[in-house]
């Protein structure tokens, strides 16, 4: 199990991450959630910098903002932009963050996934499933595979 100590975020992260822009409508976010069964999406600005995350909880919260109607105005709410509901203060990790620290952040923060960033640029995302798979591989004696430069 000592092999798990060698794993880093970059060893298990998904690199090709589906993301949205701050101006994306909540309707589009809802379509992406349904199509991919994601719980959250990173938000990148027009320069490609990571600026936050929008989760299913954020979208649900948008329906609680209207105190004036008995039923939330569903079509109107779905026209709102991601930036109106997204979480901006997001816990992140770096590509070389030990997976033990990622596990701790996911567990203590009760996150389902955590963005991997380097200098404000999104490199990937690590989900609970990725960490569980690494734990299983480490228990079987498998080490992370990196070349001599430390790259995957």
Image (tube, rainbow, N blue to C red):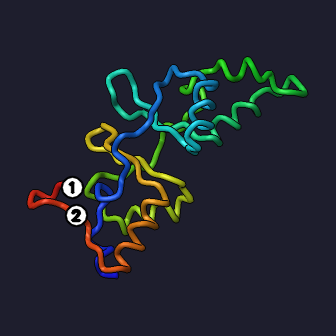
Check disc 1: other Cα within 10 Å, few if <14, some if 14-19, many if 20+. few
The x and y percentages for residue 132 are: 46, 67
Residue 145: assigned label:
2
Instruction: Work out how far the residue at label 2 is from the one at label 1, CA to CA, in angstroms.
Output: 6 Å
Residue shown at the point (31%, 43%) measured from the top left: 123
SS class of the residue under badge 1?
A: loop
Residue shown at the point (29%, 55%) measured from the top left: 10
Specify the quadrant that holds the C terminus: bottom left
Q: Are dots 2 and 1 in contact, CB under 8 Å?
A: yes
Residue shown at the point (54%, 42%) measured from the top left: 40
The x and y percentages for residue 112 are: 54, 54
The x and y percentages for residue 78 are: 68, 23
Residue shown at the point (18%, 61%) measured from the top left: 146
Q: Tag 1 or tag 2, which sits nearer the N-term?
A: 2
Specify the quadrant that holds the N terminus: bottom left
The x and y percentages for residue 8 are: 29, 62
Q: Is residue 80 above or below residue 127?
A: above
Residue 92: assigned label:
none
Check disc 2: other Cα within 10 Å, few if <14, some if 14-19, many if 20+. few
Taking the image as shown, residue 151 lies to the left or right of residue 135, namely left
Q: Is residue 123 above or below residue 107?
A: above
Residue on which the image places disc 1: 152
Name the residue furthest left. Answer: 148
Res 74 quadrant in image: top right
């Amino acid at each position: 199990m000592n092999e798990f100590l060698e794993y880093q975020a970059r060893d298990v992260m998904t690199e090709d991450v589906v993301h949205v822009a701050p101006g994306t409508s909540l309707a589009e976010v809802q379509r992406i959630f349904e199509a991919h069964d994601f719980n959250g999406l990173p938000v990148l600005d027009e320069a490609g910098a990571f600026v936050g995350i929008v989760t299913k909880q954020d979208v649900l919260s948008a329906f609680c903002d209207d105190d004036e109607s008995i039923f939330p105005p569903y079509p109107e709410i779905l026209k709102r932009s991601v930036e109106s509901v997204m979480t901006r203060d997001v816990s992140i990790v770096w590509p070389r963050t030990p997976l033990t620290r990622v596990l701790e952040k996911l567990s203590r923060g009760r996150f389902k996934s955590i963005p991997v960033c380097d200098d404000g640029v999104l490199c990937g995302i690590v989900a609970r499933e990725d960490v569980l798979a690494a734990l299983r591989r480490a228990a079987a004696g498998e080490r992370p595979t990196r070349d001599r430069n430390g790259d995957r």
